[in-house]
Amino acid sequence: MMEARLGVTTCDKCGRPMKKGQPILVIAEGNITESGDALAFQGSCVRYACHLDCWDGIEEEE
């Protein structure tokens, strides 16, 4: 389980608000801190977040 807190609560793709219970896609930057059967990840920032239905495989930059 990963927990992220977003400073901006709108979709980076469509601009509409994100709401509780909606599936989203988050692209984060960070480093793998441990590996084995599971990976431990320490993130430095969330780079991109959008509704899963909006994701077309292209990260739009502002």
Image: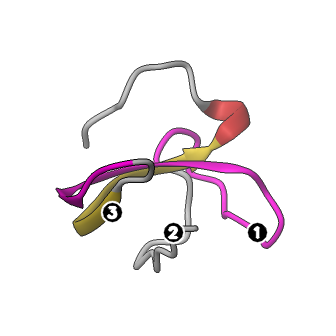
Tell me if residue 21 comes above or below residue 29 in the rendering. below
**Sequence-earlier tag: 2 or 1:** 2
> Distance from label 2 to label 1 (Cα)?
18 Å
Say what amino acid the circle numbered 1 marks.
Lys
In the picture, measured across the screen, residue 39 lies left or right of residue 57, that is left
Residue lying at the far right of the rendered structure: 21
Q: Nearer the viewer, mark 1 or mark 3?
A: 3
> Distance from label 1 to label 3 (Cα)?
27 Å
Q: Which residue is mark 2?
A: 2
Q: Which residue is mark 1?
A: 19
Q: Which residue is mark 3?
A: 40
Q: Residue at x 73, y 33 (%)?
A: 53
> Distance from label 2 to label 3 (Cα)?
10 Å
Q: Nearer the viewer, mark 2 or mark 3?
A: 3
Look at the image and give the residue range highlighted in magenta: 12-36
Task: Please state the horizontal and vertical placement of residue 3, each as a whole percent of the image.
Answer: 51, 75
Q: Nearer the viewer, mark 2 or mark 1?
A: 2
Counting other residues with Cα less than 10 Å from the Cα at mark 1, is it few (<14), some (14-19), or many (20 or more)?
A: few
Q: Residue at x 45, y 75 (%)?
A: 6
Tag 2, which secondary structure?
A: loop
Q: Residue at x 33, y 63 (%)?
A: 40
Say what amino acid the circle numbered 3 marks.
Ala
Q: Are marks 1 and 3 in contact (CB under 8 Å)?
A: no
Task: Please state the horizontal and vertical placement of residue 47, each as a whole percent of the image.
Answer: 28, 54
